[in-house]
Amino acid sequence: MAFRFTVATDAPSLFATLYATAKTIRGSGLPTGLIHLIDLRVSQINGCAYCIDMHTKEARHDGQSEQRIAALAEWERSDLFLPDERAAFAWAEVLTRAQHDRIDEAYRALQSHFSAEQIAQLTVTAAQINAWNRIGIAQHIEGTAVGMAA
């Protein structure tokens, strides 16, 4: 497959900054499993095949069941997810889809499960995976690991 460009090679300082942010998110104190599921759900919404594959593997490696991974695309209709996870997924989705009419409702749901610091961390988590998805799609990296490391 031909790449249009790769951020890692063509803009290495920007890649390093994005990668450092991804590592900081992983060390933020949010449950790693929740981060993987948010990354996977946002990647599903954005249609980034590389990220879907990577975050499915990460979620599985982190102990998420095949049933929960498979149900994530329809999490609102599934009873497999806890209320805090559901609030986090709703938040990630309204940010990803820029659903201004739903943001206040999603924020209120978060407040009953997460501190202000955790809400900020969840917000950066959603923003970060959206950035990686868009980079992956722009580079045209469907199904390959070149140029991505988040």
Image (tube, grey):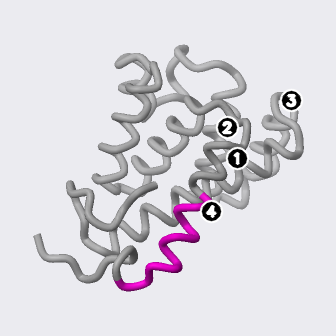
Task: Note whether residue 97 is visible.
Answer: no
> At 26% from the left edge and 57% from the top edge, which residue is drawn?
145
Task: Give the side of residue 146 with respect to residue 98, left or right.
Answer: left
Which numbered circle lies on residue 112?
3
User: Which quarter of the rendering shows the N terminus?
Assistant: bottom left
Identify the secondary structure beneath mark 3. loop
SS assignment for the magenta stretch, majority: helix
For the residues labelled 3 and 2, the Cα–Cα distance comes to 11 Å
Q: Are marks 1 and 2 in contact (CB under 8 Å)?
A: yes
Q: Let me know if residue 72 is in the magenta part.
A: no
Quarter of the image where one finds residue 141: bottom left
For the residues labelled 1 and 4, the Cα–Cα distance comes to 15 Å
Q: Measuring from the top left, give residue 78's x and y in whole percent.
A: 50, 20
Q: Which residues are magenta?
A: 10-21
Query: What's under tag 3, amino acid-wise?
Result: Ser
Identify the secondary structure beneath mark 1. helix
> At 28% from the left edge and 52% from the top edge, which residue is drawn?
49
For the residues labelled 4 and 3, the Cα–Cα distance comes to 22 Å
Query: What's under tag 2, amino acid-wise?
Result: Ala
